Amino acid sequence: MNEPVIAIYDIGKTNKKLLLYDREYQIVHKDQIYIPEIEDDDGYPCEDLESVCKWVKKSFKAAKKNKEFAVRALNVSAYGASFVHLDERGRPATPLYNYLKPYPEELAQQLYNQYGGELSFNCQTSSPSLGMLNSGLQLYWLKHCKPELYQNIWRSLHLPQFFAYLIHGKFFNEITSLGCHTALWDFTHDRGHDWVYDEKISNVLPPVVSTHSYEEVSNNNSKILCGVGIHDSSASLVPYLLAFEESFMLLSTGTWNITLNPFNEEPLTGDELQKDCLQYINYRGVPVKSSRIFMGSEHNFQEKRLAEHFNKSADYHHSVVPDEALINQLLSIDDPNRHFYPQTMQQTGPLPHFTGPLTDLSQFSSYEEAYHQLLIDLVDMQAISIKLVTGKQQPQKMFISGGFCANQLFMRLLASHFPKMQFYTSQLDNASALGAALVMHRHWNREQSIDHLFQFQKIEPMAVSDLSTHSLVKA
């Protein structure tokens, strides 16, 4: 008998994956592809949507024919802030515009001014001004700047719902995609924002359905239960919300370090917005306060400088052993010129207007000394970002996933900033894909527990001076 599986499309900007999970949510098959970008009608890089669609259809057909498995269910996890605009025949009416594409500032201000000004608008929609990353503004831009294209749009689907549409053929809107820095949702009234109706943008948006919704797709003599898709950041939080009842935060690390706090119910403030905080809506329909910082980018920039200056290999930082005595020594030196100030995160993160000189590396006696100082300062910035969304009741636990989990100095310094919180690294691979699978769990899977999926390692804080009183901002 073929093994029952759920198929998950995990659509990232770089790699596209099809993962087949068995009933214990172990990956039993993987198909991955990288498709180079093309250019949109303005010459800006964008997804090759046609090629991605061909791969999705081809790989799904192959999965159904694979005699080792019986596909019982399917869902999609995909990155946000991206619309596919369809004509009346259900075909793409525009390119898949890149969310990094520059947005006309005067056009954004035109919209903000109509609804109480930029800060008021951002508070209502729970997102900073992010241009094309506010996907609703893409529709506003098309309507006002490319009316000949806009008039051909019959339905607009966020990326997770579009790839689900390729399978089940139905048009849906889904709350995690709609409620993720789109500027379409009014968090203060828990409904679509007034501008969406005033501009008649609502005419091209399908009805909102539950993240647990699905459509049945025929497959010979059986049915495949096809979900409606979920935004990848919200998907990565699903396993933790299902597994833990006590309060926690999740720090997802990489190029951007994103802190998610599902237990902070305090309204987003203007100050938090200006420091790169926003709110997502999770699969349960509840806002999740989050903050972000361009940590991976800043770390890479600075450690390359260290490697070149001290004549070390590009990955030498992996061999640096945390040295508590050295940290205490560095913390005792009151010299602002020795600090590492943000260089790649201007206008982003918790310190959008905080800058400083490029650090003179000749004042450090070794790579190890300079790297410890760098990590002291980077972790200080990270702690500021975390504190923005901690709330009045600090959660009991912090789970950390992603690339920085391998950096013991970063992990242990961060734990030292929050002595009353327990820190754990989480070895949960393909968290977004797994989350997309788990929201379909009750529809296809008899297995009840997912506890076996989690492998945690507790992070011990360092025996160093009180880092909670240390702040780069005061240096």
Image (cartoon, rainbow, N blue to C red):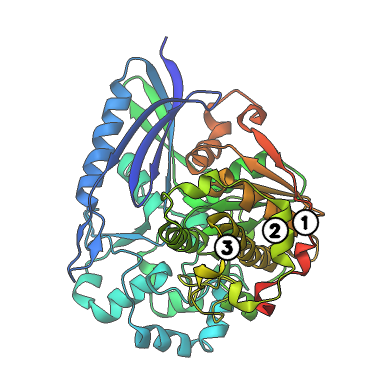
Residue at position x 30%, y 32% in the image: 60
Residue 16 point in image, percent of width and height: 33, 43
- Work out which residue is located at the far front of the displayed protein and give it: 365
Give how far across and how far down residue 195 sits, in percent.
46, 79
Is residue 96 in view? yes
Residue 192, image x and y in percent? 51, 69
340 to the left or right of 14: right
Residue at x-position 60% and y-position 72%? 338
Residue 144 placed where, x, y %?
29, 81
Q: Quadrant of residue 331?
A: bottom right
What's the distance in space between the residues labelled 2 and 3, CA to CA? 11 Å
Q: Give the secondary structure at mark 1.
A: loop
- Circle 3: residue type: Leu
Which residue is drawn at the image coordinates 56% and 33% (left, top)? 441
The picture quadrant where one finds residue 274 is bottom right
Q: Which residue is mark 2?
A: 327
Amino acid under disc 1: Val
At label 2, the amino acid type is: Ile
Q: Which residue is mark 1?
A: 464
Q: Earlier in the sequence, mark 1 or mark 3?
A: 3
- Tell me: 361 left or right of 62: right
The residue singled out by tag 3 in the image is 374
Of helix, strand and loop, which one carries label 3?
Answer: helix
Nearer to the camera, 80 or 428: 428
Q: Which circle's residue, 2 or 3, is located before the other in the chain?
A: 2
Q: Residues within 10 Å of mark 2 (few under 14, many from 20)?
A: many
